[in-house]
Amino acid sequence: MTIKMIEIKNFKSLENVKISLSNLNCLIGENGVGKTNVLNAIKYFYENLIEENISSKYYDKKNPYKQGLEISITYDLSKILNILRRKDPFSRFYRELRSLNNKHYFDSDFITVKLTQQKNSGLKWNIGYDERYMIYKTHPIYFVSARDIDLINWDSLWEVIGDIGNLSKSKQLNENDFYDDFLEEAQRKKFKKNIEAINKELDNNNIQILKSNGKNRIISLYQLQLGGVKFSYKNESLNYFSDGTNSGNFIKLLSFLVTLLSMIKLKDPTIVIDEPEIGLHPKLIDELVKKIVEESSNVKYLMATHSPRIVKNILREDGAIYRLNFKNNYSRISKMKPLIDKRAKIIVSEKEASFYFARRLLFVEGDTELELFNNKQMNKLFPKLAGVEIVSLGNNEVTLEIINPTNRKLEIPYLIITDADKIIEFKEDGKIKFLSQSYSPINNNELERKELFYYKEKREYFSISRNKINNLADNNAFDIKNNLGELRYKESYEELWKYIKNLCLEYNYYPVKTTIEGTIITTSNKHLFIEWLKNYRDSTAISYFLNRYEDILPVLRIAVGGKLDNLKKKIFYEEKNQSEEECNSFLDKLKLKKTSGWVTEFINFVFETEINISESEYDRRNKFRVYFPELYDIIENIENRMYE
């Protein structure tokens, strides 16, 4: 390993940022959160490592009382030291490197190099020039910005090639070395004769050619051996190809050359790439990341990206993902917890990875919820909904494991809407059972163990809440009131549900009392739903149930794929001389498919006929709360919990 740790203080938006690097690292986040500032801080550090290139543009402009900036990089020298121990333990270089261990800024095989720049006193280092020069030579960094690559002129790559074959000052090339191996004897004699003639003319006119250094001579040799100076692709000029093709090929070739450099020289290099995905087709992104992964065993990579596809590939290879967000005018950074589950690594796709870039996340079960929370009328009345990314989970727990910000240790506000049947079950003996599922914070031994280590007040809150829930459930026996699944409780179920909901919200879960359909069709709007439904379904079927039941709300919910209060779907028994077969026949005439668009049409109907006729936003929100009380509570939690 090379760079172990980077610490940046008061560098533009980076008030106090620490990054512990692995071999494969990726910075993510939306525009303006500080990714480029991290890369610029590293670049500024290296620009000043062996010469002064001081700039005042990197100070914290938000707080004028901060008088300076600080950048520290901790290097791991173990790779180079181990090579020297094995191959040349008596070399001067090894002795010099090893002797530095006795100085105060070293700990074993690590060295921390710190740049401090004050507004009034300039730039200071914690180590001397010779030590910094050693770091500069043994731990080079190659910076690549995909936006700024000269896409048709790759001459900068020759500098890397020169590093691969650079000569020491004590080993100069003889002029004959440049052509002895490439010319026949007759050609060589003629070539020498021409050189002698040119040199004589230069001497006679007192004209000199400045001597090339060893690195430039090596570059010339490589160019001579490789057959030229300019790069091409598929035997065509680089300007024939797209920017993305040239950018990808440039980065892949650079990766190979730097890897070769690390293998044959005492160098531990790093490549820093800003937005490598620019201009690349998705498959070319895959090819580029594959190449980077292959080379990352010898070269450390730090990339800043907006590409979910790159993130997906890095996750599959156990790379480190750092997410930056902006809070109180400063950048915050959190290292994402890697995927441990093998299924998660297989399943994770560009879609899941895209949610790591989100500002806020709302997890829902399926298409009905997606349609509901994307409703234009609702988003107009509650504009904060538009700032929330909606994730459809289905019943896939692995998808939730991949994205869940708590699991990944990411600072993304989120809420998970879950149906009641993921949390409780109404048993036939009249008892309430709490289900043990990952979707449920109620019966969850892992969470209960963690709660034991919370601070006193928080620990007591969870203990009291859980005891209250269990006691209310034990005392809250119920029976089935009728064949529509209505429940009759011994005590108040509302109090029990209040405690269940509040405890779930502590873990960012919002449990609905039945299903999402139960939040859409309610006691207070069922008359509107019947009125709307008559335009789409056989009115005789509606009349059939109206004539037989005091309250057909459960029937309406079942008709759209919801559940009864007892969380069952099948409800009909013999009653008033009608058979189950007859009931199901009329129910089929009422049924609406989940993806038929009924959610949008009904919500819009309520807005057009009831809500939008009010002039003030306050009145419209109040009407929405009357017609959709549980849905309003969900939205209110989204507004209050996700927006600080």
Image (tube, grey):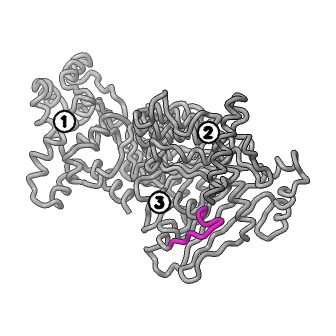
- Give the residues in magenta: 45-55
Residue for point 15% across, 59% down: 619
**How far across and how far down the image is residue 205, in percent?**
61, 58
* Magenta stretch, main secondary structure class: loop
Looking at this view, is 226 or 208 the one in front? 208
**How far across and how far down the image is residue 133, in percent?**
71, 63
Q: Earlier in the sequence, mark 3 or mark 2?
A: 3
Q: Amino acid at mark 1?
A: Glu
Magenta stretch: includes residue 132: no
Work out how far the residue at label 1 is from the one at label 2, CA to CA, in angstroms: 91 Å
Identify the residue position indicated by label 1 in the image: 550
Magenta stretch: includes residue 53: yes
Near mark 3 (Cα within 10 A), the count class, few <14, some 14-19 or many ≥20, is: many
Q: Secondary structure at mark 2?
A: helix
Near mark 1 (Cα within 10 A), the count class, few <14, some 14-19 or many ≥20, is: few
Q: Is residue 134 visible?
A: yes
For residue 546, what is the image quadrant? top left
Identify the residue position indicated by label 3 in the image: 34
Q: Left or right? Give the position of 380 relative to 330.
A: left
Q: Left or right? Give the position of 625 relative to 226.
A: left
Q: Amino acid at mark 2?
A: Gln
Identify the residue position indicated by label 2 in the image: 223
Q: Secondary structure at mark 3?
A: loop
